[in-house]
Image (cartoon, rainbow, N blue to C red):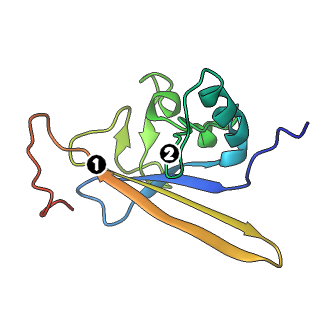
Amino acid sequence: PDYSSYDIQLSVGIQSESMNEAHVVCRSNFANLYWNAAQQLVHHSVTGCVMKAGDLLGSGTISGTREDTFGSMLELSWRGTKLVHLSSDGKGETRKFLQDGDTVIMKGFCSKPGHGRVGFGECRGKVLPAGSVVNATSAE
């Protein structure tokens, strides 16, 4: 059987409140999944759980084998023992864990020579202080 997965380029950036733009801290690929989408579906349904049109499956963390392809801050900071630089020159801000005010931006796309590019847009979220109340109509 062919256990390959889709070739989807993924990136994650972090933008602190003092930064003008996000710095990419991870570039990985959907093909790095331990279990591909078909295997995840079978695993989910084998116990009798019914899947219906519109149901979503989350892949979880998608990490590669190199440091710049690790898919979580816990991996990138090696359990908080290493600094993650938020600039290319290594002179800017650093993180071991996300901080209040940080915005995380995830992007993905597929491309193949001669076939164009399909983008999935971006998903972004801002880390708010504990106890914050957000009004859905005023959320960023």
Residue shown at 65% from the left, 27% from the top: 43
* The N terminus lies in quadrant: top right
- Quick check: 53 left or right of 38? left
Name the residue located 67 percent from the left edge and 56 percent from the top edge. 8
Badge 1: residue crowd in 10 Å (few <14, some 14–19, many ≥20): some
Position in image of residue 137 (x %, y %): 13, 63
Image quadrant occupied by the C terminus: bottom left
Query: Badges 2 and 1: C-beta atoms under 8 Å apart?
Result: no
The percent coordinates of residue 39 (x first, y second) are 72, 34
Please give the residue where the numbered disc 1 appears in the rendered image.
102
Task: Find residue 71 and report its horizontal and vertical position in percent.
Answer: 55, 38
Between 77 and 137, the one lying in front of the other is 137
Q: Quadrant of residue 127?
A: top left
> Which label lies toward us, 2 or 1?
2
Q: Which mark is residue 117?
A: none
Please tell me in which quadrant of the rendered image residue 34 appears: top right
**Which residue is labeled 2 in the image?**
56
Q: Badge 2: few (under 14), some or many (20 or more) residues near its Cα, within 10 Å?
A: few
Q: Position of residue 94 (x, y in %)?
A: 37, 41
Q: Is residue 24 left or right of residue 36?
A: left
Residue type at mark 2: give it. Leu
Q: Nearer the viewer, residue 38 or 130?
A: 38
In the image shown, does 11 or 39 lie closer to the viewer?
39
60 horizontally vs 19: left or right? right
Residue 57 lies, with reference to residue 139, above or below; the image says above
The type of residue carrying mark 1 is: Asp
What residue is rendered at 34% in x and 47% in y? 93
Q: Disc 2 and disc 1: Cα gap in Å? A: 27 Å
Please indicate whether residue 98 sits to the left or right of residue 43 in the image. left
Going 15% across and 57% down the picture, which residue do you hit? 136
Label 2 or label 1, whichever comes before in sequence order: 2
- Disc 1 element: loop
